[in-house]
Image (cartoon, rainbow, N blue to C red):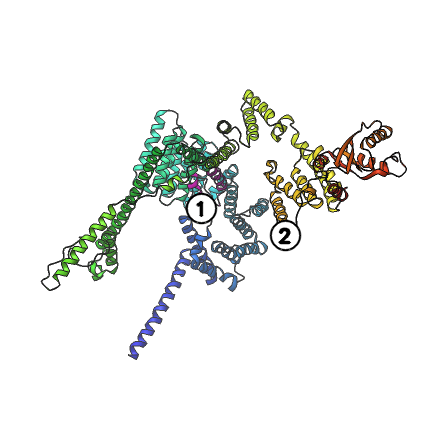
Amino acid sequence: MKIGLRYVVYGGLIAGLVLVLNACSQEKNTALSKGWHNLNARDNAYFLARERLKELQTEIDNKTQSNYNKVLFPLTVIDTNQTKTYKDKLNDIVKKASRAVTWHKNSMYVDDSYILVGKARVLQGDWKLAAETFRFVNGEGETNERQESLTQLMRLLMLKKDFRSASYVMDYLNKQTIVTKKNNRDFSLTKAQYFRYQENYRAMPPEIEKAIPLVRGKKEKRARLYFILGQIYQLLGQDSIAYINYHKAIKNNPPYELSFYSKLYLAQVTSLSNASDKKKTERYFKKLLRDKKNLEYKDKIYYEMALFEYKQENYQGAITYLEKSVAANKTNKYQKGASYLKLGEIYYGDIKNYEMSKLYYDSTVAVWDPSDPQYREISERQKVLDEFVKNLLVVRREDSLQRLAKMDTARLSKFIDKVIAKEEADRVSNEKAAAAAKKRAADQQTSNLQIIDNTSNPSDPSSWYFYNATAISRGKTDFTVKWGDRKNVDNWRRAVREEPVNNNDNSNNAIAVDTAAIAKAKADSAAKAQVPKVDKSRYYQDIPFTAAQLEASDKKIQEALYNLGRIYNLKLHEPEEAIKTFENLLKRYPNYENTAEILYFLHLINKDLGHDERAEYYKKRLISEYPKSIYAKMLLNPNYLKESKEENKYVNSLYKQAFSMYEREDYIAADSMLVNIMRDHSDNDIMDKMKLLRIIITGRTKNVLVYKTQLQEFISDKENESSALLPKAKELLSTADQYMASVSQKGGEIKATDVRYSTNTSKSHFFVAVFESKKTKKELIQKQFNTYNKANYPDANLSTELLTLSDSSFAIVVKTFEAMYPSKQYREKLLAPGGAAKPFLPFIHDSFYITDDNYKLFYKDKGVNTYLEFFKNNY
């Protein structure tokens, strides 16, 4: 046993040594075949790493899917998600390339090794370290290696989307004299790559044409560059030059895929001068479809056939081929996205079916590469169409519901029965389709199993079905899919079976069980046949039967039509459709709240279309019906917005002054200033702010009931519907309610008599003198006041009025003063000791001045003490 074990161990060591020697021999053979036999081992390692990197890059190029619907990139765009799968190979390349750097620093391949390491780091996704490597070579290497490292750095910067830095590197290299052909070729292709990223297609051909003669090795590399030139010239409308380059691409023996697209695009740029040329092209497409080698390119062929039909303005034919292109697509996400996009564009721009266009734009966004520059444009249009269709569906739905609401009960019930029947038919149809799909999947599994059985090795015992665990597992799955979970008994295919006769004592039980099974099976069958009763109430719940429901439905239609009109006009650029939509809205809802804005839109749209009469009609209507609206003002004064901006700036400065007065608790002055601003500058953007500040001043100077009433009026005022201050007003109202509730809980009472008066110093004022009836005669006092007024205020046109307050008092009212200040002066002069009012001055019990509005309230209840308290607090 020990000897046997020793042989096993030695045998394993020898086998391992053989593997190592074979690997070394393989590297040595590669070195000899490349003419590296005169180099040392470290330099040989560099060349091995270089060859393996070339092989790996070729493999990556072959696996990278190209988007032939756009101009190809001259160089492969690295996808690190793909290249990271080559982790082990890349690590081996870095390891070999590092030998010359770490072991043999005097080697002539040190700079080349660094560049090789940098390239591998790029593929690994370690871009930071790769950039540092290229910059190191640029600082320490020889001229040629520095230029190569900068070219590689430029490529890396483009991968990082740092095009600004890439342009700096390109400008620097443009000023250098590049000697080697390889560096000239690589730099030209890198510049072409930069211009491709920028979509500067006119700058690409000179660089590619400089690079083509310098391309060594396989012709297919030159074929790709000629193909790109063909794409660019075709895009620029130079079909004859494109034709030449596509032809050169074909002559350079390209791979089949590139050859296919070259021939396909060659047909596109071929002149179609007559009907025979068109038929020739159609025959060519059909020939391509018949060729079995083009099976995986059918989606592209159908796409090109669609473009051919589109050029002939046969939109329906183009749509048919595009749908076939989508159906034939298997793995090419670029082609699927292009087909969806073209369908969306046709329905959008040519057929004007925005609902269908929206569906195809949804599909396009789902498969399109988000990093593609075109994605943003596609996504924005998809969002516009999504918004449009949502509003369109709202109008259709609400119109349908309103039509249902107008039906009589019997007719509506029949209609809903039809809807339920259709839903049930759709459900059954969907279930059948799902069952058919399930059966196809099962059949496919069976087919796969048969393939396994047919291709198994007869000499292998496990290839027989009952020795093959995988085959048995699949068989069980297929059986369960088709028959369900059946027991392994006789007559297992039958849902209901007759049990075999048993002569034992339990025979009666067996018959009973059999009878019960039959009864249960019949009951189950009847239950399946019975259609479940549908609750019809849910079909009625959205129908607007009541006036409130109808009003809510109309509101939805109004907003949807308004949105559709704006989308037609501003986003879809369909002015005629916008006019139809807006006019339909005004016809259906003449009292719509945004009518002024719609009239303004209709004026502008008709004016742009040259419909001068209609434009003038909407202008006159807007000015006559909504003269105070901003839209009417803009039509009357083209500079209104500019002037309004300046006016608002001035009003804001005045408001700040009034607010400063409020903060200083100079409430009467603040309120007076706000009144003047609102009167003299009524057209401003902060009217709601001034109104609310006046209400807050009321809360500081008057009873809470007045304060609460004014807040309620502010909240319910339609002019404040869109005000940003509504939440603040509601908060203040809630606080007022809480305060009143607390007063009530404490047993207090808030009287209404002292809450009626308001302060407005700019309004007309009266002077009131109160007398006691027992001490004076009313008529005499009134006569004395008239004499006093004529003597001291001959030009003021003052009059007097006698007001009986009670059995024991009366008042002389002098009116009218323009504002508070003149009435105040009148009182001060009248009450001055030793003045002209000396004959009746001793009889005056109280005096005050009062606004015209407050006097009307005072006249009703004659509450002198109440007003005097207000007067003392506010004046």
* Residue 35 visible in the shown view: no
Q: Is residue 841 above or below residue 587?
A: below
Magenta region includes residue 607? no
Which percent across, then down, holds residue 677? 71, 36
Picture quadrant of residue 864: top right
- At label 2, the amino acid type is Ser
Q: Is residue 747 above or below residue 537?
A: below
Q: Are marks 2 and 1 in contact (CB under 8 Å)?
A: no
Q: Is residue 323 left or right of residue 620?
A: left
Image quarter where the N terminus lies is bottom left
Q: Is residue 435 left or right of residue 662?
A: left
Which percent across, then down, holds residue 620? 59, 23
Q: Residues within 10 Å of mark 1 (few under 14, many from 20)?
A: few
Say whether disc 2 or disc 1 marks the residue closer to the N-terminus. Answer: 1
Badge number at residue 216: 1
Task: Give the SS element for disc 2.
Answer: helix
Closer to us: 193 or 519: 519
Badge number at residue 385: none
Q: Is residue 451 left or right of residue 257?
A: left
Outermost residue to the top:
613
Closer to us: 799 or 497: 799
Residue at label 2? 742
* Residue 282 visible in the shown view: yes
Q: Which residues, given as a range, are shown in magenta?
A: 360-387
Magenta region includes residue 385? yes
Which percent across, then down, holds residue 73? 47, 43
